[in-house]
Structures are given as structure tokens and as C-alpha cells.
Image (cartoon, helix red, strand yellow):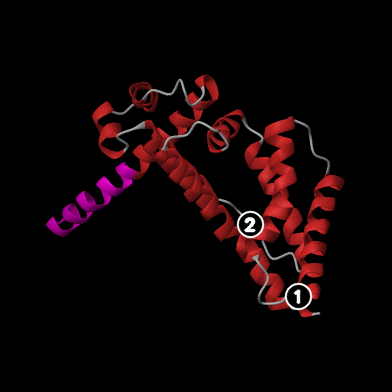
């Protein structure tokens, strides 16, 4: 191996190791959230579960709010809105199905229970806002597609439409604990699309 190769190897290793540490810590955080919930989460236990030094965790995530915030945002950024299904209703159905799948784990429910908690400090509230802002930003692609197809006017409020479609799903999953059928998911998607179109028609009258 030449000196240049050795230098490149040294550059690659820290980045690769850093990514591996983040992944391990996030997996450990999800596991512990599932087991003990947010209130029982302790950074030293996260470090032990992840197999990393506790100073490594504290250096990057000085508080558990910072750690869970990072987890929130990485999960929000990983939201798969799916391929272009060709129309607004189908795209919304795909999104709602993705939400059901992503929320339907104890770890995800533990994280989301923090997001809807009423006793959050300022840092946790900021994390919650950042999480949902990222969710809606990514979901807005669906609305933009519909606008480009001519299904919705350019002035359509993407967040309002997405809230209309997603709210009953989150209500069922996180509050009532009821299951959702494919028919109900389709109903929520069609209703949200219809309301957005009706609102646009009313604005033009």
C-alpha cells in the first residue's frame, strides 16, 4: 500500500466508524425506548447497549433530548413516500400505508408518544416541531406531484391536505390503539383529496 493509499484509508475509516457508531447508538436507543420508554432512557445504558464508550455518546449527544431529537429527525428524513403512483389518491394511500408500517413497532410508538406528550421542555418541543416539519416537507412531494398533473391548483396548502389525510391514521394508531383496514386507509385518502379539491373550487368562486 502506498503512502497515498494509507492516507486515503485513514480518511475513510473515521467516517465509516462514525456512521457505524451513530447507527449502533440509534439502534440501542430504539431498543431501550421499547423496553423502558423515554422517562427510563439513560445515556450510559445506551452507550453500553451500543458497545461504545459513554464519552462518545455524551460528546455527540449531551442529553437524552438531543439523542432522541437526532433519532426523530433521522427517522423523519427516512420517510419513504414511495414511487409516483400516477394520481393523488394512490399516492396518499401509499403514504398512509407507509405510516402504518413505520409506526407499528413498540420503539416507534415510544418515540411518537414523546412527540405528543404534554409535559415537554423547550428542547423537546423544538425537537417535536422539527420532526413534524421534516415529515410534512417530505410529504409535500405528493401534493407537488398532484399540482403538476393538474389535479390540484398551485396554491394548494400541502400541510393542510397532509394533516387531513394523516390525522385519523395517527389518531387510531397512537390514541385509540385500533387497527386500520385497507378500506379505511383508502377512505381517508379519498376524503382528504376530495376536501382539498373542493376547497380549491370554493376559492375560485
Q: Residue at x 73, y 57 (%)?
A: 92
Residue 173, percent from left and from top = 71, 36
Q: Is residue 79 rendered to the left or right of residue 1?
A: right
Write down the quadrant of residue 201 in the picture. Answer: bottom right
Considering every residue shown, the one lying at the far right of the view is 183
Write down the quadrant of residue 47 in the picture. Answer: top left
Q: Residue at x 44, y 45 (%)?
A: 126
- Above-or-below relation of 108 to 14: above
Disc tally is 2
Confirm or deny contact between disc 2 and disc 1 (CB under 8 A): no
Residue 8 shown in magenta: yes
Residue 7 shown in magenta: yes
The residue identified by callout 1 is: 203
Regarding mark 1 in the picture, which secondary structure is present there? helix
Residue 81: numbered disc: 2
Write down the quadrant of residue 194 in the picture. Answer: bottom right
Check disc 1: other Cα within 10 Å, few if <14, some if 14-19, many if 20+: few
- Above-or-below relation of 175 to 4: above
Q: Which residues are magenta?
A: 1-18
Q: Is residue 159 rendered to the left or right of residue 1?
A: right
Q: Give the alpha-carbon distance from disc 2 to disc 1, as whole Å.
A: 28 Å
Q: Is residue 149 visible?
A: yes
Considering every residue shown, the one lying at the far left of the view is 3
Residue 56, percent from left and from top = 26, 33
Q: Is residue 91 rendered to the left or right of residue 35?
A: right
Residue 114: numbered disc: none
- Above-or-below relation of 100 to 161: above
Q: Which of marks 1 and 2 precedes in the sequence?
A: 2
Residue 125, percent from left and from top = 46, 41
Amino acid at each position: 500500500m502506498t503512502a497515498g493509499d494509507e492516507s486515503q484509508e485513514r480518511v475513510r475509516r473515521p467516517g465509516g466508524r462514525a456512521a457505524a457508531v451513530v447507527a449502533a447508538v440509534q439502534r440501542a436507543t430504539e431498543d431501550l425506548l421499547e423496553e423502558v420508554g423515554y422517562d427510563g432512557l439513560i445515556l450510559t445504558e445506551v452507550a453500553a447497549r451500543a458497545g461504545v464508550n459513554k464519552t462518545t455518546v455524551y460528546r455527540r449527544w449531551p442529553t437524552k433530548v438531543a439523542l432522541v431529537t437526532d433519532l426523530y429527525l433521522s427517522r423523519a428524513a427516512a420517510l419513504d413516500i414511495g414511487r409516483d403512483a400516477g394520481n393523488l389518491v394512490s399516492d396518499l394511500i401509499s403514504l398512509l400505508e407507509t405510516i402504518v408500517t413505520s409506526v407499528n413497532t413498540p420503539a416507534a410508538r415510544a418515540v411518537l408518544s414523546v412527540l405528543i406528550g404534554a409535559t415537554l421542555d423547550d428542547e423537546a418541543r423544538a425537537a417535536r416541531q422539527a420532526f413534524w416539519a421534516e415529515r410534512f416537507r417530505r410529504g409535500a412531494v405528493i401534493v407537488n406531484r398532484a399540482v403538476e398533473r393538474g389535479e390540484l391548483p398551485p396554491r394548494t396548502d400541502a400541510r393542510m391536505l397532509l394533516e387531513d389525510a394523516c390525522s385519523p391514521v395517527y389518531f387510531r394508531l397512537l390514541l385509540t390503539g385500533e387497527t386500520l383496514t385497507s378500506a379505511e386507509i383508502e377512505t381517508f385518502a379519498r376524503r382528504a383529496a376530495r376536501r382539498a379539491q373542493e376547497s380549491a373550487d370554493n376559492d375560485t368562486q
